[in-house]
Each structure stands twice: as structure tokens, then as C-alpha cells.
């Protein structure tokens, strides 16, 4: 297996989700693509996780809010 950590130019998660993956894009050949980024809801910023693609398995279209604490990554739903 392989893990690639890539920083995008889009500061907000919604902008990253709208960005199409092209055929020559490095992420287009990946089995699983998980986006993590800033979210804004009711004037407050937070963090969200979105599974953009996961070959061979169903995945939700929901954006999952999370926090990073001393205990690690905490999912808020």
C-alpha cells in the first residue's frame, strides 16, 4: 500500500470537492481519495473529511466534521 499526502491550492473543502480530477491528475489512478479541509457553517469555521472516491466499496456523500485534540482525530458525528 501507499499513502500520499498532498496539499491543494483550495483553502475550503467545498472548493476542493468541486475541483474535477483530470485523467493526468496524480489522484485519478488512486483506489481511495479522502479530502480533508476547512468548512464554514453558520459563520463558524471547522474541519471536514470527505471520501471523494473509494473503488470497490460504497461510501457516503456526507462531509464528516472532525477535530484534532490531544487524544487524536475525533469525529463529531
Image (cartoon, rainbow, N blue to C red):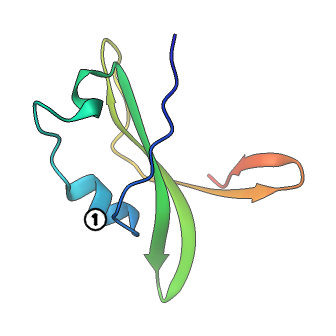
Q: Which element type, helix, strand or loop, lies under badge 1?
A: helix
The residue sitting at the right extreme is 70
Tell me residue 63's x, y (percent): 43, 53
Residue at (49% x, 89% y) in the render: 43
Q: In this figure, which residue is indicated by the disc labeled 1?
A: 15
Image side of residue 70 versus residue 20, left or right: right
Residues 46 and 23: in front is 23
Position of residue 34 relative to residue 7, above or below, is: above
Residues 35 and 60: in front is 35
Bin the neighbour count of mark 1 within 10 Å (Cα to Cα): few under 14, some 14-19, many 20 and up: few
The residue sitting at the bottom extreme is 43
Image side of residue 48 versus residue 66, left or right: left
Residue at (22% x, 29% y) in the render: 28
Residues 61 and 6: in front is 6
Figure quadrant of residue 17? bottom left
The residue sitting at the left extreme is 23
Tell me residue 34's x, y (percent): 43, 38
Tell me residue 77's x, y (percent): 62, 52
What count of labels does the image hold?
1
Image side of residue 4 versus residue 77, left or right: left
Residue at (31% x, 11% y) in the render: 56
Amino acid at each position: 500500500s501507499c499513502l500520499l499526502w498532498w496539499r491543494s491550492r483550495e483553502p475550503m473543502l467545498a472548493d476542493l470537492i468541486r475541483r474535477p480530477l483530470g485523467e493526468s491528475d496524480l489522484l485519478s489512478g488512486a483506489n481511495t481519495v479522502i479530502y480533508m479541509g476547512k468548512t464554514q457553517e453558520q459563520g463558524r469555521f471547522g474541519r471536514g473529511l470527505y471520501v471523494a472516491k473509494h473503488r470497490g466499496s460504497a461510501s457516503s456523500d456526507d462531509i464528516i466534521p472532525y477535530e484534532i485534540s490531544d487524544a487524536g482525530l475525533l469525529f463529531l458525528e
